[in-house]
Amino acid sequence: MKATVWGCRGSLAAPGPQTVAYGGNTSCVQLELGDGTPVVFDAGTGIRLLGLELARLPRRPIHVVLTHLHLDHLEGLGFFVPLWEPDVEIHLWGPPSPVDSLEERIARYLSPPLFPVQLSEVPSKLTLHDLPDEEFALGSARILAEPVSHRGPTVGLRIEEHGRTLTYIPDHEPYLGAGPAGVDPEWLSGFSLAEGATVLMHDSQYFEHEYPSHIGWGHSSVDHAVSFARACEVKRLVLFHHDPMHSDDELRALEGRARALWGPDGQAPELAYEGMKLALDTEVEAHSPA
Amino acid sequence: MPQTVHKSLPLILAREFAANIATPVTVFDEDGRLVFFNEPAEGILGQTHADVGELAPSEWTKLFVVETLDGTPVPLDEMPVGIAHREKHPAHGPFAFTTVDDIRHEIEVTAFPLLGREEELLGVVAVFWERREA
């Protein structure tokens, strides 16, 4: 299983000279499974470039799995080239809601006045699925989607193939209402998704001093991200969902803080960046951002 | 896939909600186990959650013997918690119970179910408070 980061910015796309190293596109991660099945986690603005890449490859059913429907995880969908190709089969998975169907909720964005074309006009062979409560097979991998602490129906994702696990929880506030100290794993949002993961991509939107003014917004401070990863005994922590107000220099400082909190043992936490490739079957590649 | 199955997210959030308010609250899981009560509840129940831990229905109904105000024992099925659990709708009522240190409390209890998709019962939350003379 290989993963490529196409967007790791949180909340709002943030292009510009201050965000070149880690990128300004919002959440999108491509997974290449052992059997070649293309899987995409989230449809932030990063999915636009991924769509161009996939359009050049032989046609295969594409699975796009949405953790939730906040705009930074959905706004790229309308610019995903395969969506507009009649011969492409796309399966769009998303968290269930007790009120509206996934189609109804996505159509709120993919319809006027927010978007010029309606979801019903999409020419590709599009099928929408509520993410099931139980783990399910997707190509040669198995996926588990479970609700996590964030605003609105939101899931985290755990995907396993050949004994390697990638856990993706881009938006998560696991210690809402309680500090990390002494939280029983049984009472920790997201624990079963991340337990023992080979790689955990996790929300780390804020510095510690920024968190108090954002409690309840659904995101983690860097110390909470590190505490969560430690509690789950993950092997590698990739910090994700970078605040749009953080420049590259500020993100480097945030990474430094994460590494100080992590300590000397094991693999040091690292920031996700656009173009980051993770080969979970072998060694995780250790390139640095440009 | 994961070895540890944690509580459902609504139960986790219910616990954190309870832990951060001054109203006495008890939280029950989908099987009716008493999985948490907050510090204000400890003040009335005469026990701490840390001491008693999670309790099965057969355990907590022995620890906290609930009666009507005139002293008639109330079976679990007729308590607001039992009704909310069984019938999946809110229930309310006045009750009395006596703590292990022999203090009688008269309380009002409101219990409501936590329902997930397709009416799946995820737990019950019960809020209670001491009755006051009118």
Image (spheres, coloured by chain):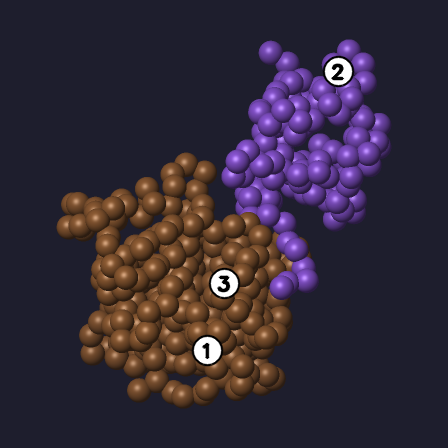
Q: Answer whether labels 2 and 3 touch (C-beta < 8 Å).
A: no
Q: Nearer the viewer, residue A90 or A169?
A: A90
* Disc number for residue A2: 1
Q: Is residue A75 above or below residue A222?
A: above
Determine whether the residue tagged by mark 2 lies in a helix, strand or loop: loop
Residue type of the residue flagged with mark 2: Thr
Which circle's residue, 3 or 1, is located before the other in the chain? 1
Residue plotted at (71% across, 32% down) = B44
* Disc number for residue B92: none
Determine whether the residue tagged by mark 1 lies in a helix, strand or loop: strand
Q: Colour of chain B?
A: purple
Percent of width and height locating residue B25: 63, 35
Left or right? Give the position of B64 relative to A48.
right
Residue type of the residue flagged with mark 1: Lys
Q: Quadrant of the C terminus of chain B?
A: top right
Q: Nearer the viewer, mark 2 or mark 3?
A: 3
Q: Is residue A165 above or below residue B91?
A: below
Count residues near mark 2 (Cα–Cα under 10 Å), then give few for <14, some for 14-19, many for 20+. Answer: some
Residue type of the residue flagged with mark 3: Leu
* Disc number for residue A138: 3
Q: Answer whether labels 2 and 1 touch (C-beta < 8 Å).
A: no
Residue plotted at (41% across, 67% down) = A39
Q: What letter labels the chain drawn in brown? A: A
How far, Cα to Cα, is label 3 from label 1?
A: 15 Å
* Disc number for residue B68: 2
Instruction: Report in which chain the residue with disc 2 lies.
Output: B
Percent of width and height locating residue A183: 63, 58
Instruction: Report in which chain the residue with disc 1 lies.
Output: A
